[in-house]
Amino acid sequence: MKEEAVLCLKDVHYHVSSDDEELSIIKGCDLSVQPGEKLSIVGRSGSGKSTLLSLMAGLELPTGGEVRLFGQALNHLDEDRRAQLRALQVGFVFQNFQLMPSMTALENVLMPLELFQVSDADDKALQALDKVGLGHRLSHRPSELSGGEQQRVALARAFVTEPKILFADEPTGNLDETTAEQVQHLLFQLNDELHTTLVLVTHDSDFARQCDRALTLHNGRLQAV
Ligand SMILES: Nc1ncnc2c1ncn2[C@@H]1O[C@H](COP(=O)(O)OP(=O)(O)OP(=O)(O)O)[C@@H](O)[C@H]1O
Ligand SMILES: [Mg+2]
């Protein structure tokens, strides 16, 4: 029997209006992502990939259609409930790392745990940093770390709460080829260990192909690659 989808999109539309223009970014996306599945989404710059991730994670609400995350229709939850759902079960990794510049590596990884007063937070954060090979960089601030190291801290922060789903938006976009490969490997390794569902946006077709399924976002719709 098929398990219930972790993420389900039904005829999702998203348009924004400015002064005199209506811009239709997402024009009818349907998708079902199974537990533990690794899905990649490619598409040219400006095709709406980051917008689609925001809709999947409930950071934005669709202007048409429905997004269900863990079986819950996100349109039916208020902003607080959506934020709570994300904090407990969703991880994010971004192209520009998005670490807190004033905090050390350890403090950055502790942050999501402290929001919920998780027991043994220190041990969990230390283990997470150890897993990404940064056990020796605990007290460094982001400006004192290389790009690859910053992204590894971001991976530790994303996985430390053991999220059910991880959204990664061009996680290797700012890294050189060798470092990108290391981060890719680490992302898949952590993903497999924790049985996390992955939705990956990337411009790197090799990276995309390593997922179970690869889709293209084109003209506001998802298509098989
Ligand atoms: N709030 C908004 N208001 C107006 N336009 C927007 C808004 N959000 C996104 N857009 C536009 O929607 C389009 C899609 O943007 P998005 O950032 O999702 O693209 P992308 O596929 O992630 O691109 P890239 O590969 O460069 O990151 C762009 O043309 C962008 O300017
Ligand atoms: Mg983008």
Image (cartoon, grey):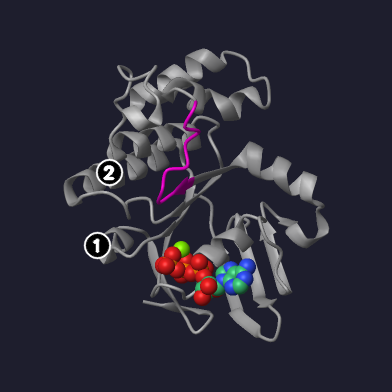
Q: Earlier in the sequence, mark 2 or mark 1?
A: 2
- As drawn, the label of residue 185 is 2
Q: Quadrant of the N terminus?
A: bottom right
Q: Quadrant of the C terminus?
A: bottom left
Number of labels in the image equals 2
Q: Main secondary structure of the magenta part?
A: loop
Label 2 element class = helix
210 w.r.t. 83: above or below: below
* Residue drawn at (64%, 20%) of the image: 118
Give residue 137's position: percent from left, percent from top. 33, 20
Q: Amino acid at mark 1?
A: Asp
Give residue 186's position: percent from left, percent from top. 31, 39
* Residue drawn at (25%, 48%) of the image: 180
* Residue drawn at (65%, 44%) of the image: 86
Q: Amino acid at mark 2?
A: His
147 w.r.t. 113: above or below: below
Q: Nearer the viewer, residue 97 or 135?
A: 97
Give residue 121's position: percent from left, percent from top. 56, 17
* Residue drawn at (70%, 69%) of the image: 62
Would residue 27 appear left or right of 146 to someone viewing this image?
Answer: right
Would residue 148 appear left or right of 27 to someone viewing this image?
Answer: left
Q: CA distance from mark 2 to mark 1?
A: 12 Å
Residue range of the region highlighted in magenta in the rendering: 93-102
Q: Nearer the viewer, residue 53 or 209?
A: 53
Residue at the spot of label 1: 206
Answer few, some or many: residues within 10 Å of disc 1's Cα (few below 14, many 20 plus, some between 14 and 19).
few
Give residue 57's position: percent from left, percent from top. 62, 55
Q: Residue 79: in sight, yes or no?
A: yes
Q: Nearer the viewer, residue 211 or 5?
A: 211
Q: Is residue 154 magenta?
A: no
Answer few, some or many: residues within 10 Å of disc 2's Cα (few below 14, many 20 plus, some between 14 and 19).
few
